[in-house]
Amino acid sequence: MNLTVWYNRVLDILVGGLLLVIVSLVLLQVGARYLFGGAYTWSEEGNLFLWGWMILLAAVRTEHMRVDFVVNHLPRAIRKVTAILIGLLSLFLLGLLFWGGIQMVELTRNDYYIALSWLSVKWLFVALMICTALWVATIIQDTVRTLRTLNREEA
């Protein structure tokens, strides 16, 4: 199995598993509220934490929207340069996101969720840093794939 296929499958399984846990927690919360007249205080904070992880992991896996109508009508050499510039700009922005994640981990390292007093808020920003690193790998992979496609068209 190709490394890219394996990588994408693992991300899909993680995102799907997180979604399953989130839906289960919501159903548990609704059931507790309507059947027993009370609610679990921890489930909302747990859901928010899991949503953060799920969204960040899903963002790594998705195709990112781009308007390439103009770029597709440019000469092949300029399309190569454009692909490289877009890749570099994306990596720069992800670097800023990663740096911001480091700052937020430092800022929130002693902050804990109220209902989940054992869980530090910093772990949500650790998710940001992990997913940013995965996103960097995805951007590099996409840029290399685009350049290879353009080279094949040239041959």
Image (cartoon, rainbow, N blue to C red):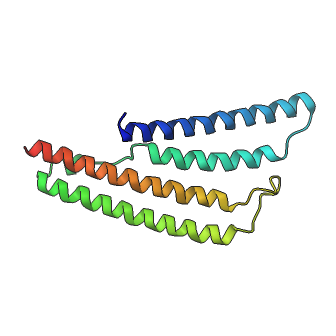
Q: Residue at x 24, y 48 (%)?
A: 146
**113 displayed left or right of 102:** right
Quadrant in which residue 78 is drawn = bottom left
Looking at the picture, tell me which residue is in the foreground, 72 or 45. Answer: 45
Quadrant (top left, top right, bottom left, bottom right) of the C terminus: top left
**42 displayed left or right of 123:** right
Q: Residue at x 75, y 49 (%)?
A: 45
Looking at the picture, tell me which residue is in the foreground, 87 or 109. Answer: 109
From this viewpoint, which residue is outermost toward the left? 155
Quadrant in which residue 93 is drawn = bottom left
Quadrant (top left, top right, bottom left, bottom right) of the N terminus: top left
How far from the left and from the top, in percent, is residue 137?
A: 39, 53
Q: Residue at x 16, y 47 (%)?
A: 150
**87 displayed left or right of 49:** left
**106 displayed left or right of 97:** right
Vertical order, 56 against 86 (above or below): above
How far from the left and from the top, in percent, is residue 149?
A: 19, 44
Vertical order, 99 against 128 (above or below): below
Looking at the picture, tell me which residue is in the foreground, 14 or 154. Answer: 14
From this viewpoint, which residue is outermost toward the front? 1
Counting labels gives 0
From this viewpoint, which residue is outermost toward the right? 37
How far from the left and from the top, in percent, is residue 95?
A: 44, 66
How far from the left and from the top, in percent, is residue 52?
A: 62, 50
